[in-house]
Every structure is written in structure tokens, then in C-alpha cells.
Image (cartoon, grey):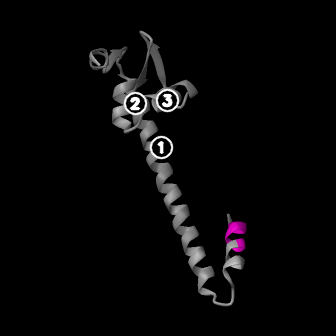
Amino acid sequence: MKEKNRRASLKSKGITYLHVSKAASLLGCSEQYVRSRCASGELIATIVGGAWHIEEKALENFLKGKIKSKDVRASELAKENEAIKALLKDKSKNAAVVGREIQRKR
């Protein structure tokens, strides 16, 4: 634990890098999740002393992208819910018919 606190961040050429434990804490996720994002290239990072260090700016951009993705998905779900409500208002259709129509619209 002492090692993680000591390496919470470092600076090189004017760029601040955060240790994987600090990045995970800021994102509210596990260190393994952050490491996998680093390995996949989703997060701009470098390995220093055997540990991933993530560019602070890259972490901010990653977080903004996640928030935007959630907003887009929420909007899509709201539209889908409205379509389902409209289908359910039609009393002439039974549940099976409504279910098939919903599946086709996806």
C-alpha cells in the first residue's frame, strides 16, 4: 500500500501521469479494469517501474466519453419505452404480438 501512495502521480515533460490505483479510485472501478483499458489502448498510458501510469488528460477524456455514452443510451431507452407504451395502448394486440413488434424495432 505504501508503494501505491508514493506513486500516485508523476510528471514528465509537462504531462501528469496517474498511477493505476489513483486512476481506478477516480473512475470508481477496479485497478484491473483500468489496466485492461490501458492494455487495449483505450487509455493512453505507459508502464513505469512495472506499473501502468495513465495520462491525466486521457483519463479525463475517457471519463467524458463514458458519461456521453450513458446519456446516449438513456435517450435510446427512453425512445424505446415510448414505442412500447404506444404498442401497449393498442388493446387489439395481445402480449405476444407486441413482443414480436418490439423485437423487430430493435
Q: Say the numbered circle drawn on residue 65.
A: 1
Q: Which of 95 and 10 is in front in this view?
A: 95
| Percent position of residue 62, x then y | 46, 37
Query: What residue is shown with label 2?
Result: 57
Q: Say the numbered circle drawn on residue 43.
A: 3
Q: Residue furthest top?
A: 49
Secondary structure type for disc 2: helix
Q: Is the residue 31 above or below the residue 99 in the image?
A: above
Nearer the N terminus, badge 2 or badge 1? 2
Q: Is the magenta stretch mostly helix, strand or loop?
A: helix
Secondary structure type for disc 3: loop
| Percent position of residue 27, x then y | 38, 37
Q: What residue type is labelled 1?
A: Gly
Specify the quadrant of the image occupied by residue 60: top left
Q: Which amino acid does label 3 sit on?
A: Leu
Q: The C terminus lies in which quarter of the figure?
A: bottom right
